[in-house]
Amino acid sequence: MIFMDKAVIQIRTLLPGESEYIELTSLGNIVREGDKVIVSYAESELTGMDDTQTTIIMDQADVTIRRQGSFTSTLEFSLLEPRQCLYHTPYGTFNVTTHTQEYRVVDDERKMELFLKYGLVIEGESQGSTRIEMVVRPQASRDQ
């Protein structure tokens, strides 16, 4: 069975070498399909990807982040093994390997939370660790 809601999506990202999180709140959609949760939203100028749609597909084992638009990529994360991906940007295409260090999804009817910490290797060069914290609430219950 598929359930879809309009959603308020709050994302906090801590990039390698930074001490402060980048915070973004966006309207989007959350779809629950079996054991998968799919969250989609439009990126903003704040992220530098303002012509890009992001879709995050999660289950208890792994997560996939897909971007389409001026940035087109599919990044896969799994606690079991590193994942090889291609990352397309306006500046070129890069070979990327993700090394998932922490991954957790908490999902109930009132909200869904994602915690993801990963190392990124681009063209053989380690980029350090990135941390993403996301909270998704149905739009109607955002004041709860």
Image: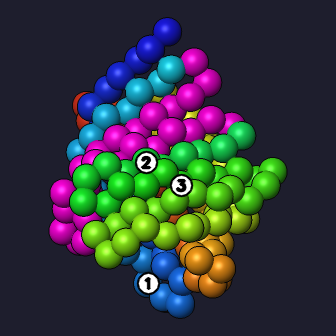
Q: Is residue 105 above or below residue 47?
A: above
Asked if the residue at tag 1 contacts the one at tag 2, i.e. Cβ–Cβ closer than 8 Å, the answer is: no
Q: Amino acid at mark 2?
A: Arg
**Mark 2 and mark 1: span between their CA atoms?**
25 Å
At 71% from the left edge and 40% from the top edge, which residue is drawn? Answer: 61
Task: Evaluate whether residue 57 shows in this view.
Answer: yes
Return the residue at label 1. 20
At 51% from the left edge and 32% from the top edge, which residue is drawn? Answer: 37
Return the residue at label 3. 75
Query: Which picture quadrant has residue 34?
Result: top right
Q: Which mark is residue 6?
A: none
Q: Amino acid at mark 3?
A: Leu
Q: Is residue 36 left or right of residue 27?
A: right
Q: Is residue 48 left or right of residue 109?
A: left
Q: Locate residue 120, reporting x and y percent.
A: 61, 72
Q: Amino acid at mark 1?
A: Glu
Q: Which residues are magenta?
A: 34-60
Asked if the residue at tag 3 contacts the one at tag 2, i.e. Cβ–Cβ closer than 8 Å, the answer is: yes
Query: Which SS class for mark 2?
Result: strand
Callout 1: few (<14), some (14-19), or many (20+) C-alpha neighbours within 10 Å?
A: few
Callout 2: few (<14), some (14-19), or many (20+) C-alpha neighbours within 10 Å?
A: some
Query: Which picture quadrant has residue 63?
Result: top right
Q: List the single residue furthest toward the front.
A: 92
